[in-house]
Amino acid sequence: MRLYRMVSLVIIAGLLALASGKPCETQTSNNELFLSLNKNLLRSLETREGLPNPSVHLALRLSDYHNLAKESEHLNKLKNDLHNDIQSSLSNSQSAVGLLALYTLALKSSCYDLNTITFTVSEKSETLLTHLKKQMELEKEHIAFSHRPLTNYYQYSLGVLGLCVSGIRVNNHVSNKLIKAAEHEHFKHGETESIDTYAMAGMALQCVNDAGSHVQNAAELNTALSKIKQKLLASRRTDGHIGNEFSTGLAVQALLAMGSHVAECAASMEAMRTDARSNTYHNAMAISQILPALQQKSYLTIKNRECLNEDDTLVLEPIDPVEVLPSQTKVSVTVEVVTSSGTAAHYTVDVPKGRSLLEALELLKGKNVGFTFDKETSLWGPFLSMVNGEQARQSDRRYWHLSSDGTALTEGINDFKIEATQTISIKNTVY
């Protein structure tokens, strides 16, 4: 367990911020930390494999510090590489609501004219926002007859948020589905409540509430927002994290958006600062979610963004390459694979201490003992798609649940490090 600053310091910080009368006020002595996180995000643009990340662009644009040339370069990559990937999904009738929404938010954060972005499907060219609206209608209809979206409520919430911050009136039937899902506590991943989903739904519904267009069920909307806030606060741990280290950023963004005061988020802010200083957030996607929160902003901030008189002082200093010598110490890792039928297989491999779980699985695969796997890319990095010939597909509501000695992993296979002898369980799970 990580060490945290004394509770008294958190209380003092909270009292000082309360005296200011501003929601979620933090001290301004953390500029150096913000700059460091900002630079880490900028460097990730140079090293990232796969598609450009719209969430990283969002965080860079919401920051107080900018390198406008690098941000413009990344925007062009989004408009080409990410755009083409979404175009391919739409042409193949695949759901792309989450990426479409993030793409929308990223463009909006750069004050780009969304009406100039189009996709062509079946020889018909329509704007990005038109396609996002159509995708949301398909998601809504799927909820109507199967009681769940085509994708999940996290992506559904992103869709509502993307439309709303772009000034598009969200269809009442679309937002009502999200309100009902919050009311009936449908924001789960497997048997566990998804704090990320509650946070994204909170920001989406707060935007709808601020727009003032949801007058038919205003009381229900307010009740849903209150329930979401209650869920987030109830999930706060004694160390300040809300859910876990990697859900706290979005949760604090949601609390900020919903007008929470410092007594409700000061400890969570401090937990994120402590984690950031200890390099917990080495994944660019994780940094992209905490940086806006630490700077007292949320994705709703994009709605009124004007992109005028922006700072352009952020410079990346060259970094001397550091040679990391391979560890001579090896630890034994047992990998348990549990298929959808419940049958289990066990394998053992010796792994150099400090290697990633992905590297450990590659070593195991290379032993030719019958263990195989395939992976796919995501904004969070690679994830397992097939193990021992069995898929865990979103269309089947299945995923590979990973745990270490019985504790669910909060990091991806490329981020989780093997530091000691342990059992890694890979289980085909329904969500």
Image: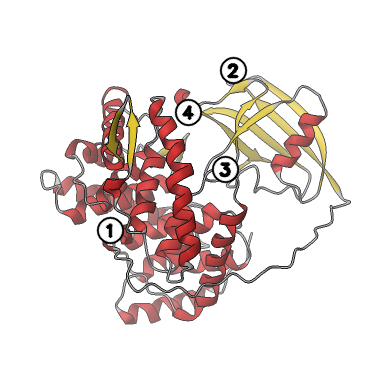
Q: Position of residue 328 (x, y in %)?
A: 89, 51
Q: Residues within 10 Å of mark 3 (few under 14, many from 20)?
A: few
Q: Which residue is mark 1?
A: 303
Reading the image, the residue beneath label 4 is: 394
In the rendered image, is residue 231 in sight? Answer: no
In the picture of the structure, the residue carrying the numbered disc 3 is 50
Report crowding for label 1: few under 14, some 14 to 19, many 20 or more residues within 10 A (C-alpha): some
Label 1 sits on a secondary structure element that is helix
Q: What secondary structure is found at the residue carrying circle 4?
A: helix
Q: Nearer the viewer, residue 154 or 248?
A: 154
* Quadrant in the picture for residue 43: bottom right
Judging by the rendered image, the residue that carries numbered circle 2 is 341
- Tell me how far mark 2 sits from mark 4, CA to CA: 18 Å
Q: Please tell me which of labels 1 and 2 falls first in the chain.
A: 1
Q: Position of 416 compared to 154: left or right?
A: right
State which quadrant residue 229 falls in: bottom left
Q: Dot 2: what SS?
A: loop
Q: Where is residue 199 drawn, in percent x and y?
A: 38, 51
Quadrant where the image shows the N terminus: bottom right
Residue drawn at x 62%, y 53% is 47
CA separation in Å, label 1 and label 3: 28 Å
